[in-house]
Image: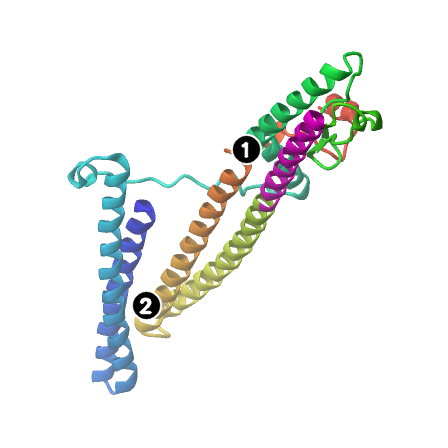
Amino acid sequence: ALAHATSDVDDAREEVRMLEEVHGLERARFAEAALGASELARTSTEIQTARLALAEAERGVLEARAELARALAVPVRAVESVEPVLDGPVACSSLDPARAEMLVAGAIGRRHEVSRALAEYALAESRLRLQVARQYPDLELDPGFIWDQGVHRWTLALALPALLASRNRGPIGEARAAREVAGIAVTEVQDSVFADVELAVQRCRGAALELAAADSLVAAAARLVERDRAAYQRGETSRLEPARTELQLLRAERARRRAGRGIAIASLELERAIGGPPPQASDWPDPRLDPQEEANRP
């Protein structure tokens, strides 16, 4: 938050500076009767709006430093000299369909809620086995849960042999009911993890689309700046035209930084959804390949 707030201040301060430069050039054109009063007034209003945005951004820095100090349990003065540095987004990068599928499988194995629900189910399963063993010591039950590679989730074995309904039904029935409740909890937790990862993946993709659009906007604005600067150097226009397009470029770059912030936030949300930073792409097996082919691949 502090890094983003500091970046906002820099952007707002630069916009105020460029608007004031444009306003000065417009006043010169107005004095030459080459510019209308309405355009001059509009730029003046934009300057006041930009100054207000700068004040709000500076307030955001103060609040972000206070939040950081509170999180670290230190006085605000201890973090006044901190200059935050933003790392590039990791989780959202190279998010192809195969990798997204494996992220879901990895989340089931890494999220502590799933482990806790499975542990509670295993406990209920062991109590049921104990009640069954007391009446049928030679009876072996199938594993309580297995990993289904096809759907990337834990599958529960809730069935019991029919003969168990005839004897010791009270304790066995109670243990079986407790196991079913634990099984429902496992299913709900897995469904919740699936939903979290899917939502985070879609947010990554949406943020990537927004970033691509912002990149296109910056590229278009940069071309306009080059064109107007070249025209100014040839003496075809005044300094006002390139100053205006430079302001447009600044705003486009600011929009791109906001888009980059969005993809960084989406990356953090994806990391939370999958239970931590994603492994490198080479660490994931490709589900579209046979395991033997995967092992022999260079």
Q: How busy is the neighbourhood of tag 2: few (under 14 within 10 Å), some, or many (20 plus)?
A: many
Type of amino acid under label 2: Ala
Which quadrant does the C terminus fall into?
top right
Q: Where does residue 18 sit, x and y in percent of width and height? A: 27, 64
Type of amino acid under label 1: Arg
Q: Where does residue 247 sit, x and y in percent of width and height? A: 34, 65
- Residues at marks 2 and 1 touching, judged by CB atoms closer than 8 Å: no
- Residue at x-position 27% and y-position 64%: 53
Q: Nearer the viewer, residue 68 or 45?
A: 68
Location of residue 281 (image quadrant): top right
Q: Earlier in the sequence, mark 2 or mark 1?
A: 1
Q: Secondary structure at mark 1?
A: loop
- Residue at x-position 33% and y-position 47%: 1
Q: Magenta span covers which residues? A: 170-195
Residue 170, visible in the rendered structure: yes
Q: Nearer the viewer, residue 134 or 229?
A: 134
Q: Estimate the spatial distance between the alpha carbons at disc 2 and disc 1, rounded to whole Å.
A: 52 Å
Residue 132 part of the magenta-drawn span: no
Is residue 259 rendered to the left or right of residue 117?
left
Residue 176 part of the magenta-drawn span: yes
Disc assigned to residue 243: 2
- Vertical order, 30 against 140 (above or below): below
